[in-house]
Image: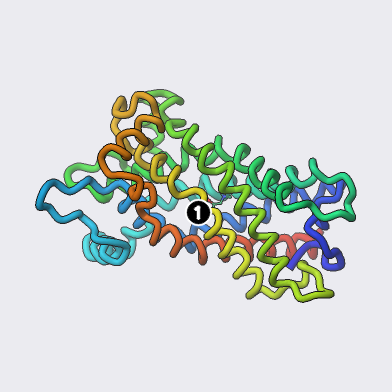
């Protein structure tokens, strides 16, 4: 399932001077991102609602008891459409973000190749993925800020402040300028640099484990690519989840609530809810991570193949 079916190592697509593969990675990454959003958004909505639900008062029940309860209540109140709330923003933001992400990973690999016949080490694969996390942050932050605000607004009682993603972006800009749109940048970097490193490194690693002796990773069946992609999603989120909780809280908090950004969120969270709160939403995150990223990597590999056939 790769562009270079007769190459056997992870560097096959990134030999120095192969400019086309960078462009192909960009477009194939975008296609992968669309597959990821379409497959994973319902569970993402549940994740954000669980992560941001208000702390119950003494003797009160939490609004949602868990993933299933949140899914049931959302469907009962808003129909299935409720699970797809705020999907336009990530589709518009995630497609270019994944394009840049896969391109950045490719670039990170190319920059480290000294000999095209020597495969990159796991650490080098991690660093290449980490570079992609730096690249994607500027695209990721506004999309995530708008998505989280829309996801929790639908969950709140009373009048809805934002009519949709564009209205939300306009209002944020009016209220706090570009700073407000980019609220959560440090938290996103803290999340995505290590998580992206893990994501791309573990994808190559699991593919390697699934490749029978004497065969090439590029010959893997779609089922194995799906499995490797799904596992990459799981590893990504095992690393990303604590920072993601802090980011979601920061990005959905009223202006001025956390004067020192992610540090203030962390201090408050530790004092009021303890370390376990850093793993809030773990069930929907991990339930989403596998299928969404399996679809993403398969979408990526299939698009690369199509592009190879076309060009
Ligand atoms: C946080 C995030 O977007 O993670 C991506 C996987 C997913 O489940 O959406 C991976 N990556 C950060 C590398 C784009």
| Rendered location of residue 145, percent (x, y) | 41, 39
Tell me which residue sits at (22%, 61%) in the image: 77
State the image coordinates of residue 5 (x, y, percent, origin top left).
Answer: 83, 67
**Vertical comparison of 233 with 271: above or below:** below
Of residues 111 and 73, the one drawn nearer to the viewer in this rendering: 111
Quarter holding the N terminus?
Answer: bottom right
Residue 71 in sight from this viewpoint: yes
Q: Position of residue 131 (x, y in %)?
A: 66, 40
- Mark 1 lies on residue: 237
- The residue under the point 39% across, 32% down is 170
User: How are the residues colored?
Assistant: rainbow
**Nearer the observer, 174 or 284:** 284
Q: Is the distance from the Cβ of mark 1 to the nearest ligand 1 atom less than 8 Å?
A: yes
Left or right of residue 287: residue 194: right
In percent of width and height, residue 53 lies at 26, 48
Is disc 1 placed on a helix, strand or loop?
A: helix
């Amino acid at each position: 399932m790769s562009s270079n079916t007769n190459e056997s190592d992870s560097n096959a697509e990134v030999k120095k001077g192969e400019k086309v593969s960078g462009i192909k990675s960009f477009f194939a990454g975008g296609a992968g991102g669309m597959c990821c959003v379409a497959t994973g958004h319902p569970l993402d909505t549940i994740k954000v609602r669980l992560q941001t639900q208000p702390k119950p008062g003494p003797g009160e029940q939490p609004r949602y008891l868990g993933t299933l309860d949140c899914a049931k209540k959302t469907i009962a109140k808003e129909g299935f459409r409720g699970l797809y709330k705020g999907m336009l923003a990530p589709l518009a933001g995630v497609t270019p973000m994944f394009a840049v992400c896969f391109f950045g990973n490719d670039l990170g690999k190319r920059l480290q190749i000294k000999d095209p016949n020597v495969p990159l080490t796991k650490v080098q694969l991690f660093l290449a993925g980490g570079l992609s996390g730096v690249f994607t942050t500027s695209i990721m932050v506004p999309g995530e800020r708008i998505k989280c605000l829309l996801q929790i607004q639908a969950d709140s009682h009373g009048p809805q402040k934002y009519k949709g993603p564009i209205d939300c972006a306009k209002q944020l800009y009016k209220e706090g300028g570009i700073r407000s749109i980019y609220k959560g940048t440090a938290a996103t970097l803290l999340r995505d640099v290590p998580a992206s490193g893990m994501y791309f490194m573990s994808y190559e690693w699991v593919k390697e484990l699934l490749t029978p002796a004497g065969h090439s990773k590029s010959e893997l069946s779609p089922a194995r690519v799906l499995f490797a992609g799904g596992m990459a999603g799981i590893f990504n989120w095992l690393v990303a989840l604590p920072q993601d909780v802090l980011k979601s809280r920061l990005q959905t908090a009223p202006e001025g609530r956390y004067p020192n950004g992610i540090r203030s969120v962390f201090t408050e969270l530790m004092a009021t809810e303890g370390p376990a709160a850093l793993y809030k939403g773990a069930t929907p995150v991990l339930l989403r991570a596998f299928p969404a990223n399996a679809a993403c990597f398969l979408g990526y590999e299939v698009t690369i193949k199509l592009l190879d056939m076309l060009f």
